[in-house]
Amino acid sequence: MCYYAVTMMILAIETSCDETAAAVVRDGTIIISNIIASSAAMHEKTGGIIPEMAAREQIRCILPVIEEALQQKTYNKQHRTKTIKKKMLSVLCSMLYDIDAIAVTVGPGLIGSLLVGVETAKTIAYVSQKPVIPVNHVIAHIYANFLREQKTENRKQIEFSAVALVVSGGHTELFLMKDERKLQWLGGTLDDASGEAFDKTARLLGLGFPGGPAIAAAAAKIRNPIRQPADEIRIRLPRPMIGSDDLNFSFSGLKTAVLREVSKLKASNQLNCETIKQISYEIQEAITDVLVAKTIKAAKKYNVKSILLGGGVAANLRLREKFNLQLTTNNLQLICPPPILCTDNAAYIASYAYFHNNPVPWKNIQAQPDISVEVTPT
Ligand code: KG4
Ligand code: ZN
């Protein structure tokens, strides 16, 4: 039985954090276009996101980004180069002729940033009379696993049921998925998210923003981490809640542990390239050990066939490597999106909207910065 429209083209808008993104996706799976403007370089200078600056940049980028997403679909390159950054909203709406619905992230996220996407989507929906579908950004991360490029033929078939781990800058959550639509929240972080632990450690070590890729790069420089010369400092960090009975996480203690190590090293004048590499290696090991252990625990408890990953931290290669080591013993398949689809983009927003096709009148759409991710089965 098919629950979904036969062919449905969705324009999606995503502005929950520092990215301004728009995408056109067919039938929830085929990416027609996927445009992302990031203000990460701007935030690198400050070592973190300044919400007002992010929102101001998003106001500047939103219309050109949507326009480019719509133009890539038509492959009208001349048109694009001439008109980018100049198109009026009303003209932009006239480009929506074969778009069936508009999807937009309503939360969780930064209020100023969310408002840019939400108000733009509402205006487009009003002018074009298209339905608008509100999307929970965190849960939508899972749907990056259902996407493929227009010309890519093969995609690994996902076997359900599955456990999905969403690891982003603000969230670390586990879900049970009976199929593409049936979701149940299993557990999440009690304090900091795993991405936050990467970002905060990177800031303490002066490695820049976003922290995850910077920590991963520094950790990769350790050649033989197990056999360190005896006189070298071996830094060990805790694996918080790794053995707890529940499916929750806690990462704030790791930040404190890193702070303690950094202070000790500074006091003994030993904070240098080598010790920074060691801390980076160890924090990546600690975070990935916990994420893998808890996800496998959930997979065993619910006797699932697959593990799905999503969110920026899912781009981490060490995390994927550790999951892969667990697959045969536990008879599981691992599905993870390509790194570009793990971090924030609008393509998975469109995919989620396709599988949860619940349009609401544009007047009722509101930014919800604290929207819950704790879905229960319907
Ligand atoms: O999903 P995402 O792009 O944005 C949010 O919704 O928050 O996730 C961003 C997070 C940041 O904390 C960033 O440091 C982390 O994902 N991240 C990584 C990697 N790439 C991005 N963490 C570890 N390893 C990576 N390669
Ligand atoms: Zn995200």
Image (spheres, rainbow, N blue to C red):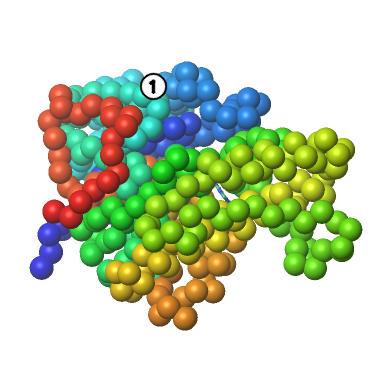
Q: Is residue 77 left or right of residue 43?
A: left
Residue 371 placement (x, y as % from top left): 28, 35
Q: Is residue 273 above or below residue 53?
A: below
Q: Is residue 37 above or below residue 178?
A: above
Q: Can you see residue 246?
A: yes
Q: Number of numbered discs present?
A: 1
Q: Is residue 370 left or right of residue 34?
A: left
Up-down: is 122 above or below 182? above
Disc 1 under 8 Å from ligand 1? The reply is no
Q: Quadrant of residue 303?
A: bottom left
Q: Which residue sits at x=29%, y=60%?
A: 176
> Is any atom of residue 31 visible in this view?
no
Locate residue 197, reporting x and y percent: 56, 43
Quadrant where the image shows the N terminus: bottom left
The residue that appears at 53% across and 41% down in the rendered structure is 252
Left or right for 368, reference 16: left
| Label 1 packing within 10 angstroms: few (<14), some (14-19), many (20+) | many
* Along the line of sight, the residue nearer the viewer: 321 or 84: 321
**Residue at the extreme front of the image, as rendered:** 244
* Residue drawn at the location 13% of the way across and 64% of the way down: 2
Tell me the amino acid under the disc marked 1: Gly
Observer-nearest of 189 and 43: 189
Q: Secondary structure at mark 1?
A: helix
131 or 99, which is in the foreground? 131
Q: Residue 110: which quarter of the image?
A: top left
Check disc 1 and report the residue beneath it.
Answer: 112
The percent coordinates of residue 91 (x first, y second) are 29, 25
| 156 or 171, nearer to the observer | 171
- At which x and y percent is residue 136? 29, 41
